[in-house]
Structure formats: structure tokens, C-alpha cells
Amino acid sequence: MRDKQIEDLKDYKYGFSTDIESFKAPKGLNEEVIRFISNIKKEPDWLLQWRLKAFERLKVLKEPDWQKPKYPKIDYQDLYYYSAPKSFKEKPKNLEDLDPKLLETYKKLGIPLQEQKRLNGIAVDAVFDSVSVATTFKDTLTKKGIIFCSISEAIQKHPDLVKKYLGSVIPISDHFFATLNSAVFTDGSFVYIPPNVKCPMELSTYFRINASDTGQFERTLIIADKGSYVSYLEGCTAPMRDENQLHAANVELIALDNAEIKYSTVQNWYPGDKDGKGGIYNFVTKRGLCRGKNSKISWTQVETGSAITWKYPSCILKGDNSIGEFYSIAITNNHQKADTGTKMIHLGKNTKSKIISKGISAGKSDMTYRGLVDISKNASNSTNYTQCDSLLMGNKCGAHTVPYIKNKNSNSNIAHEATTSKISEDQLHYCQQRGLNQEEAVGLIVNGFCKEVLQQLPMEFAVEAQKLVGISLEGSVG
Amino acid sequence: MEQKLKTDFDKFISTSNFSSQEIKLKKEALDNFLKNGFPSRKLESWKFSDINQIIKKNIGELAFYNDYSIKNEINDDIFIKEIEHNKIVIVNGKVERLSFEYEEKDKINLLTLDNFNQNSNESNSLLSLNNSFSNKISNILVKKNYSFKKPLIIYQITNEKVSNTNINFQLNFELEENSSIKIINLSDDNSEKNFINNLFNFNLGKNSILKNYKIDKKSNTNIKYDYSSIIQKENSISETFIFSSGADYIKNEVTCNLEGKYSSAFINGIHLLSKNKHHEIRTKTNHLYENTKSYQLIKSVINDSSKSVYQGKIYVDSKAQKTDGYQLSKALLLNEQAEFNAKPELEIYADDVKCSHGSASGSLDENSIFYLMSRGLNQTTAKELLINGFLLDVIEKITDNEIKKLLKNMIGLN
């Protein structure tokens, strides 16, 4: 039974692609394409101007090259910046209107779009390539006054909110990939939680990258108004493909007074085959702003996929007493590379941050934790605690830790710890003595190693993540 | 600056008697420096201390020509009386006296090198600068099976004759099999506003032991860069201790290459800073072979608006299984204007290793102060006691008891 499971899992589980004809913008990156995107999405003029401003800025910016994993040069003129399934030109009114093939794809992925899946208590805003498909559970959310829709819809229906907050955390003058996203973003999710509302369910989006050569430029904006709470899940799978695909999403979180946002990610995009061919480039900019007093933003991520993962979900702790948290598991196997971590920028008084990062590298992979803790002069009584542990399996992989620590306030404390080691022979021996085979023993120990982070995930995700940890390390033992 | 460099270089070459080979190498080094200039914050390793800006702001225009023909008087009062020792006295970058009175003459070989280590290939432009302007390089070779009977104290003196000048100095040590040496490197600066650039090369043979204690205590406005390169063969031990407090700006850089099995490196350091001093320790321990060990402990006490930086990197090659690498940096910020920056880095390519780093920074523990005050100490004494205890931790790591005592007295910690 177990052997069969392993056999099933060995090849990339979600490696299939549906042949819905895609509706594409012409190849290349120029003003025309940006106008095309803006036009087809019927965007107001201010947004088009905003995009064009970002594009102007992009011309000046250079692609960064300080990261550990190097990749072949990307030809930005050779990409499609917009593609939508053709049948979506007219938006479907309900689930029955959807392309049956698309529904089938989602079924394979196990996404609970259908009625029966409501039992899972998840409202799904599925993104197929670049356009939101459908949004369920709207009624329940609408009653509470919660807005959960695609960002295109939000631009049409709630332009004031979008205009007010879009780019307030990741400005258009940010780094290269973020600015690229600002210029050409196609779709993504928008969440607004009104004051003093506790979102009754986990909000979730599944991303799928489909059409070949299509960089995905998602834009997610989550606003938690005063005293509200929301937990947001993001999960990713992508079909198997040979060419590298660029994914440069921007995620902005804004928490006002007493609000809390919990953002969880399970990322399992196609990592490339065993020889390191293909795979997704995951260059995502995620940043949260604790704008109000007593606000809290918590990032949890399980990164197992992608050929190259390069992201630093960050918290800017601007409000007094605000809290930032970052929990991460990153697993690299075969030829995967990851350079990930977080930034905690303490600006307000009595701000707290906590970073727990677990890195596991196996095969010929390479993993880097890179983080910044910056306590500014005015952030008195702030504390940070950082723990980053790495586990190495085999001597062909690498694990690196590059923390930057800046303390400019004498009333603040920073503590940082990092360790790197392998699974101890004693632990393995102990487990094997009690009847587990080597692989099971390693799985158990690794899950224990990651437990602190897995605990932070919502139930549904925790189960999936635990499985993923096992799958990702398949074949790396012995 | 470029014109100044070129004319000063020509003047330097014409007044010295270097061989054509040396001149060629020096010229290459100069070209390399001209190409790169002083390092700025754009370089990752200079991120926290932009020496280009620091020199511009504090010194302005630098002179590079240094007249090595001047004979400098040495005042014997400056020598340490507490312990018997061998001496090397360096004044303004020139070796004025070498005396190994306590050692067997045939066990030590003193050479003046014709050429220098070609580490100018490295991207570190300050080494190129050093190579191009330093005087003849002395090489001290300790022969097989010989252990120094008494410590060697290197007095590095600058006097008021130099100011707004770049002083470059280089010294090499070679330790043959089973040999050992204890060195105290003592800075005694009576000059102001110079840029002092030191380079020490240590080559450790099998089973050899190097103990190197670097003390910079005397307050002055010089800007210093001090680079030690330590290459270690099988079973060798190096111990480096840095006390950095005196000059306005110091960057101590230590690179250890653990090339032989069972070799180990210890690097311990103290930053005791006040006013607007800006000191940095940067270490790089490269574990290149199996069964090597390294330990680092760096502590900073930062007062007024001073700034302390620690950058430490442990590199473990895929060959270097069974490596132990430890690194700990702690900082006490005593004033609101004080700043501490750290970048403790691990780069690991082997799986059977134990490596860790820790970094903590913050203020003095209020509870501890309260505890001491409730037992009758006043606040100032309580704080002093806690700071002394904090720093003693590092001093206690010194393995040589005689030197430990000497340094405790010198620094004023008991």
C-alpha cells in the first residue's frame, strides 16, 4: 500500500495541463501591452496612469543580482503578459456556466468549488491563469459586510478602497520585480474586512499557472479594518512544463488598529525534473503593514516547490504595540534553490516580532535563509526573537544563514539563534529500533523538526503540509 | 586622489631601493587599487562601514608618501615592564627594532621578502594598497620544534610626524612543524587623522600553535584597517584575541583557512566603545578539511553615539565533514544613540556538521541592577560590575595565564 503511494507521488502529482484555448495579449513588455491589459479589464484611467508610472520607473530599475541562486537571464520581451481562458470573455454567472474541462482540472486538484465542498468551510477564489473564475460563499461573507473578490472586480465595485490602499505597502518605486508587477498585474484577490468583524471562515485562493510562457503577475490586497480578524490561505500547484516560468506576484496586507491578519501559504509549484530542468521561478514580494495600534500580522509558509524560490514576506511594524510573526518551512530537493526569509522593521514603540525558520535541504539543492531585523531609534521596548535551523541531507546540498541585525535602540532586545546539523544517528537508531524503516524514521524526525511551524497552519493546511514534507523529501534518504 | 596616488607612488619608488621585480608587483597592486578605489558600502562586506566615506569625512585628502629613511627615536618608557618579552618596534610603518633577546638565534630566521603574497587578486582593494605602498616586508620563520620562551610584543607606534597620511605595514610569520609563538600586538598611537592599513600573514605548519593578542586602547582619531590571514595545517591551533577601543574607526578582519585535519581556530573579541567611535570585527572561518573546529565569541559594550559591527562567516566546504563551528555575538547598548549591527553568517555544504550562531543585543538587565542595588551598591557601581562581568567572559577565554593577567591589568578589568 505504502509502496504504491510512493509510486504515485514520485512523479509530480499535479503535473497535467488542460487545453482550454488561451486568449493572449501580444508578446512583449511595452506601453501598448499595458494599455491593452488595462483596456481589456475596463480599468479606470487613474489605474492606467498608475501602471504607466510604474512602467516608467521600471525602465530605470535594474534586475537585482545579489541573491544566492543564479538563473539564466529572463527575456522580458519574450513573455506574454496577459492570457485568459477564451470562454471567460463573458464572465460566468454561476458554477454551471463554467467550462466543464476547467471544473475537471479543479477536481483533480481537489479544490472544493462544488456545493458538497462547502462542508470544508472554505470560500474559494480560484485563479486560472490570470482571471478569477468564480467566487463561492459570497452570501455568508456579504452578510458580514466582508468583501472577498478578485481585484479586477474590486477595481470596478470598490474603487475608493483600492485607490486608497493599492501600493501603500509596496509602492510602485520598489524593487524590480515588484514594480514589474505594478505595471502589468492581471488579477488576484481582494479582501476587505469591515471594522470589528471576525471573518467566520478561512479565505482561500488556489493559484494555477497554465498557459505556456505566461508570467503570472498576481496582485493581492488584504485590508483588515479596525478590530477585525482574517485568516487567509494561499496554495499553489502548477502543471508540469519544461520552460521556466516566472511568477512575480505582489501581496500587500494592511492591518489597522487592533486588527489581525494571518496569511498562510503552501507553495508546491513544479520544481523542475530530477535533473533540474524546468520549474517555476517564484519571485514574490509579500509585505504586511501593521498600520494601527495593537495590530498583528502573521506569515506562515511551507515552501516545497519551485525551481527557485526567492521571497521575503515582511512586516513593517508601524503602529505601537504591533506584532509581526514569521513561520517558515522551506524544503529543497534535487536541483531546487531557495533564498527566503523575512524582514521585520520595527518603527513603533513596544513592537514585537518572532521569526521561526526551518530549512531542509537534500539532493543537490541549495537553501539560504536571509533575514533582516531592524529596530529603529524610536522603537523603544521592542523585542525580536529569531530562530533559524537548517537540516542537511547529503553532502551535495548547501544550507546557508544570512541574518542582518540592526539595533539602534538601547531599550530593545534582539536575540538570534541559528543551528545547522544533520539528523543524528542516535535519533534514527532509536526510531528504527522501534520498527520504523529508515524513510519513515526520517519522515517522523523531519516532521518533528518542523512542528513549531506546522502548528501555526490552519487545520486543513496542516494535513496537506505534513504530507508535502514527506513527498518533498522522497528519495533523498540513504 | 588618483593623481596624488601616482605622484606619491613615483616618489616612494624613487626614494627606496626595490628590485625591478618588486617594482613591477607594486605597480600592479597600485593599478588594482586605482581600478577599485577605497571600498564603499556598495560592497557587501563594507555594508555597515563605508570606509570611503569615513576617510573623506574625517581626513579629507590623504597623502600616500611615507619617508622610510627617517630614523625615529624610541622612548623605552613605553615598553611593558611586567613581563619579559621579545620586541618588534614599528614606528610609522617602519620596523625600527627587532630583538629576540630571549630566544635561541638559530631557531628563528629573519628574512626580508622580495615579493609579497599575491593576495592582491582578491577583491579587497585595501590589500592592494598595502602591497603597493608598504616597505620591505619582514618574514619571521620559527623553525621546527621550537617554542618561543617569551612572548613577542609588537609595538605599533605612530608619532606626531605623520598626519593625514596613509601608513601601510605588512608582516609575515611562518611557523614550522611543532613550533609555537605568543604575540601581543600593541598599538600606541600619538598621531591624529591617519589611515593605518596593516596586513599580517600567518602560516601555521603541522602541530604549531599561534596565540595572537591585539590591543588597541589608546584614544586617537586615526582610522585603522587591520587584516590577519591565518592558514592552518594539520592539528594546528590559532587563538586570536581582539581588544578594540582606542581609535575612532577600526575594522579588524580575520580570515582563517583550516586546511588540515584537526586544526582549530579561536577568535574572541571585545568592542569597548564611547563617543562616536565606529568599530567593526569581521571574521571568515573557512573549514576546508575534515574534523576542523572553530569558536568565536565577540562582545560589544556601546556607549554614547558609538557604533559596533560584527560580521562573521563560517564557511564549510563539502569536504569538511565533522566540522564544529560556533559563533556568538553579544552587545550591550548603554545609550539611546548607540547602534549595533550584526551579520552572523553560515554557508554550509557538508551535512555531518554542527554549526551554530547566536546574536543578542539589548540593554543592561534591569533585574540584575535591582538585585545589586538592593544589596547596597549604587547604580553606577552596579552597572560597572555587570559590564565588567559581561566583558570578563571574553578575557577568561585567553589561554595564556601570564598574558591574561597582563591584559586584565591593562584594560582595567579584574
Image (spheres, rainbow, N blue to C red):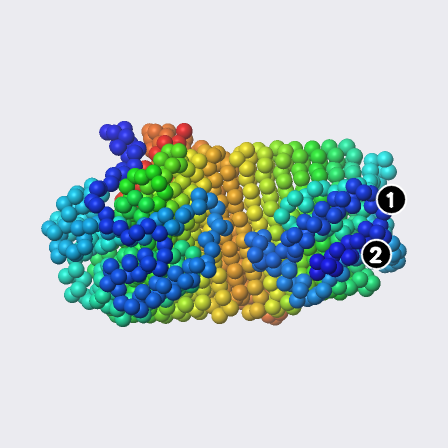
Is A28 or A258 nearer to us in this picture? A28
Judged from the image, the secondary structure of the residue bearing numbered disc 2 is: loop
Q: Which quadrant would the N terminus of chain A be assigned to in this image? A: top left
**Subunit under mark 1:** B
User: Mark 1 vs mark 2: same chain?
Assistant: yes
Image coords of residue B352 (percent x, y) = 50, 35
Q: Which quadrant would the C terminus of chain A be assigned to in this image? A: top left
| Left or right: where A117 falls relative to A311 | left
Who's the residue at 64% across and 43% down the image?
B256
Q: CA distance from mark 1 to mark 2?
A: 29 Å
- Residue A168 is marked as none
Q: Amino acid at mark 2?
A: Asp
Image coords of residue B13 (percent x, y) = 81, 51
Who's the residue at 46% across and 58% down the image?
A61
Q: Amino acid at mark 1?
A: Glu
Image coords of residue A90 (percent x, y) = 16, 56
Q: How many marks?
A: 2
Residue A136 vs A167, above or below: the answer is: above
Callout 2: 10 Å neighbours few (<14), some, many (20+)? some
| Left or right: where A318 falls relative to A141 | right
Nearer the observer: mark 1 or 2; the answer is 2
Is B89 or B22 nearer to us in this picture? B22
Q: Is residue A190 visible?
A: no
Is A99 or A28 nearer to us in this picture? A28
Who's the residue at 60% across and 46% down the image?
B284
Image coords of residue B8 (percent x, y) = 78, 57
Callout 1: 10 Å neighbours few (<14), some, many (20+)? few
- Residue B101 is marked as 1
Q: What residue does disc 2 label?
A: B67
